[in-house]
Image (cartoon, rainbow, N blue to C red):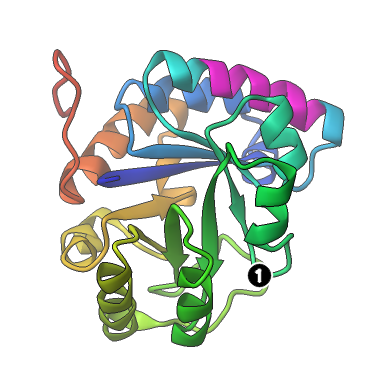
Amino acid sequence: MRGLYAIIDYDFLAKRGIAPLEQLERLLVVRPAALQLRAKGAGAREALELARVMAAACRARQVPFFMNDRPDLAVLAESSGVHLGQQDLPAREVRRLTPRLRIGLSTHCLEEVEQALAEAPDYVAFGPVFPTSSKRNPEPVVGLAGLEQAARLCRQARVPLVAIGGIEEATAAEVARHADAAAFISALLPPGGLAQVTAAAQGLHLALGGQLSEGESAS
């Protein structure tokens, strides 16, 4: 896992009148390190329908697809994995449900990182690194110093680290010194709208040390 971890946020897009699948199409051109569907405001049926389409599209491009929060929907959609927050089912319970799913865990402090690593996840997400507007009640900012400490713990455990929260293209290279990948929501929908999604994703992916697929070029 190296480069851009793209998050398609159903609620964020709905407020702007944009269909998630329209953004998906433009993001997959870049072949990000991973892609996640975050659909907290969608009903279970709609979320499952979206996840099934997205999982299939991601498989075709060899991009790991993660469902946020819902291991049941992740299984039904044949996702690569599920991303779990601190209030979601514990990783060990998800593995009892299905050992096939890859598991990513959200963390917001070093104690949570240590607890997450004890569960042997497929990756750990850590943040917010910088102030963010993507969440209503964000956790305290951890900063680059906190990210560096989390990276040390993850390297020792040989678990990839995904930075999240307030990261921009201007700060991506500095973040990439510590994290294997970085996750984005709002930065993947620039002021120019859908027309600029692919270019924004390419810029972030390259700044984070990711590589574009053969035949693609940065805009």
Is 6 drawn above or below residue 65 in the view shown? below
Q: Report the magenta stretch's main SS.
A: helix
Which residue is located at x 46 percent, y 19 percent? 59
Kindly tell me whether residue 185 is visible in this rendering.
Answer: yes
Give the image location of residue 196, x and y in percent. 35, 30
Give the image location of residue 198, x and y in percent. 33, 28
67 magenta-colored = no
Task: Tell me where residue 129 sits by quadrant.
Answer: bottom left
Which residue is located at x 32 percent, y 69 percent? 157
Is 50 drawn above or below residue 43 in the view shown? above
Which residue is under mark 1? 86
Tell me if 200 is positioned left or right of 20 in this view: left
| Magenta stretch bounds | 46-56
Task: Tell me where residue 203 sits by quadrant.
Answer: top left
What is the crowding at mark 1: few (fewer than 14 residues within 10 Å), some, or many (at least 20)? few
The N terminus lies in quadrant: top left
Amino acid type at circle 1 is Gln
Circle 1 SS class: loop
Give the image location of residue 41, x and y in percent. 79, 45
Task: Tell me where residue 148 sits by quadrant.
Answer: bottom left
